[in-house]
Amino acid sequence: MSRSKFVDEAVSDWSRIRPEINLTAMEAIQRLVWSGRLAEDILERTAIASGLRRRGDYEVLAVLRRAQPALLTPVEVAQQLQTSPSGMTGKLDRLEEQGLIKRTQDPDDRRAIRLDITDTGQTVISDAFDSSITVYQAMLADFTPNEARSLDALLNKVLTRLDELSERSQP
């Protein structure tokens, strides 16, 4: 069964059980959740097909590439990716073992480490980025340019609201 059909059936069932409740928000958010899960899966497979071990490796390389010529610290990368600094260690070790990044000592602070993307890493992220763009375009291939812009505006509004809610202890 398609995910869209699953949502349709769930909403239909809940409407039968609780007809007094407007389920429009549930329906829209469930479609968003399923869309996000499927998009993540597709992007994970795209990263792997590009020679990376995980989508997270793509994200680290992308952050480092976009920051150039600046060299970021592991903490700065973790902050941009909204992950814990301790969670970055394994990713960085893996990327360094593959020869995609190198750790260098900060010239201004001997205790600090800076991350540099290697030439091989730049080639890998460039190829992976190109593949990702192709996949992003395929995901919205049925949309007109205006529909894609409208979708982006609406999703930006949803994301802004979800950011606000996530900062609170309760919605």
Image: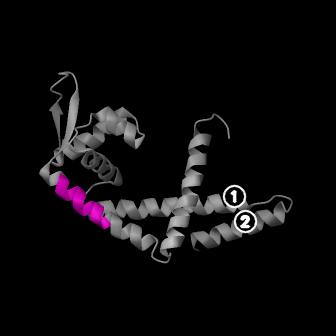
The answer to whether marks 1 and 2 mark residues whose Cβ atoms lie closer than 8 Å is yes
Snapshot quadrant of residue 12 = bottom right
Residue lying at 40% horizontally and 35% vertically, measured from the top left: 84
- Give the residue at mark 1: 26
Residue 62 is inside the magenta segment: no
Q: Looking at the figure, which quarter contains the N terminus?
A: bottom right
Residue 139 x %, y %: 45, 70
Left or right: where does residue 47 sit relative to residue 108? Answer: right
Q: Is residue 59 left or right of residue 170?
A: left
At label 2, counting other C-alpha atoms closer than 10 Å, the crowd grade (few under 14, some 14-19, many 20 or more) is some
The amino acid type of the residue labelled 1 equals Met
Residue 130: quadrant of the picture: bottom left
Q: Is residue 21 above or below residue 167?
A: below
Residue 73 location in percent, x, y?
A: 27, 33
- Give the image location of residue 118, x and y in percent: 15, 47
Q: What is the spatial separation of the Cα atoms under label 1 and label 2, in whole angstroms? A: 8 Å
15 sits left or right of 143 in the view: right
Secondary structure character of the magenta stretch overall:
helix
